Image: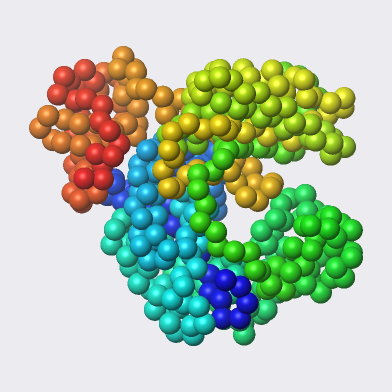
Amino acid sequence: MSGAGRWVLHLDMDAFFASAEQLTRPTLAGRPVLVGGLGPRAVVAGASYESRVFGVRSAMPMGQARRRCPHAVTVPPRFVLYQSLSEQVMGVLAEAAPVLEPVSVDEAYLEPPALAGAGAAEVERFAVDLRAAVRAATGLPASVGAGSGKQLAKIASELAKPDGLRVVTPAEQEAVLAPLPVRALSGVGPVAETGLHRLGIRTVGAIAAMDLRELTGLLGTAVGTELHRLARGVDERPVAPRGAAKQISAETTFDADLTAMRAVHEAVARITGAAHRRLVASGRAARTVTVKVRSADFTTHTRSETSAVASTDLGALTAVAQRLARTAVPEGGVRLIGVSLAGLGDDPPPALFEPPREPDLVLDAEPESAAAEEEPDLARPWRPGDDVRHDEHGHGWVQGAGHGRVTVRFETRTTGPGRARTFPADDPALVRADPLGSLA
Ligand SMILES: [Mg+2]
């Protein structure tokens, strides 16, 4: 599947979480929407394009995002909904191409055998149809990039965003790659980026022009060799159908090294929460907890513990991770902590919240959003974003609550923008509803 005439496509849903909210809550369509919690440590899990024009980005602290875009509507994440839409997307892709490699809940690589040796026009027609099929099945926009390998396909989909298509031909790939920042290459995280910047290397073109020995001296033989090839557009990595992720992990590199055990424990709890959120979202449980601790001098210590029974209990998994971290913490400071959950039970769905592939990508989460995935507490007051059902008015979502009242917007994917109505908070006609009801 390599060599001349190879075409790899990368499909990436546009602002997936926010688009899913706008789809199923039509009042939000065309508006700035932020998906995420509101706690002091909350980060943006999703941001609609209408909010991005104000400088909001995914993973930005929620407080900062709301200052940049004060008129945005903030809703809590509904992972059950995103997972369901993801399965529809992957179903469409699997039908279009037998060779499919899901990368995360909202992106995948394809290498359609029908396109081997095809011209750019044929690739473009295929991609136009693919985008239309995803839109027809889900109502959601997707961008598609195509190129001679996975790296170029991913870069092309990034260039195509939002809701676009970009085919990078072999003739133009060098010109497309050269001006991109070094971070555009997979495998270049903040640490490698800093090292490259120190050498004055800021673009992919500059990496391509580097002496290979200098690059491997900086990044090691494996990574250096791979990056040198990718920078020159040489990418023979196969598009490989992948089964379920064997593990779900999250890690954080700290701005300042942690020296206090209490800070380590808090960080472990937060990182375990992030991994746990994706564990729960993928409908699975974990038996093995692994903690990775990297010291200030880059020594990495790993500790692992496997229990007899798979668990989804955040408290139990966190306690194990904290115990392991205690034995792994080195003298001096802690630079990075990673937690992974593995030994996952049940048959996983085809689309998964997988660990980030870029080694330095930080996936962080505040405890609030993990709590949001727990069983609803019927005694709890209504919270904005809750899915509800009313005997007379149907499915809706809570826009606001307080002072014994709750305001609900009644709408779903197919209703168009709905009306808001206010009820007594204890109105017996109003009950909690499955988020998937908003797809109706
Ligand atoms: Mg995406």
Closer to the camera, 291 or 40? 291
Closer to the camera, 165 or 368? 165
| Quarter occupied by the N terminus | bottom right
Q: Position of residue 180 (x, y in %)?
A: 67, 68
Report whether 295 appears left or right of 406.
Answer: right
Q: How many labels does the image show?
A: 0
- Residue 197 seen in this snapshot: no
Closer to the camera, 114 or 213? 114
Placement of 67 over or under 11, stated as above or below: above
| Residue found at x 22% / y 25% | 431
Closer to the camera, 382 or 196? 196
As drawn, which residue projects farthest toward the left? 392
**Location of residue 163 (image quadrant):** bottom left
Q: Position of residue 14 (x, y in %)?
A: 44, 57
| Residue found at x 44% / y 84% | 121
Report whether 142 appears left or right of 246.
Answer: left
Q: Give the colour scheme of this rendering.
A: rainbow
**Location of residue 435 (image quadrant):** top left
| Quarter occupied by the C terminus | top left
| Residue found at x 29% / y 58% | 137
| Residue found at x 74% / y 35% | 336
Q: Where is residue 378 in the image (x, y as percent from the top left)?
A: 30, 17
- Residue 377 seen in this snapshot: yes
Placement of 359 over or under 110, stated as above or below: above
Placement of 183 over or under 392, stated as above or below: below
**Location of residue 380 (image quadrant):** top left
Q: Position of residue 49 (x, y in %)?
A: 45, 56
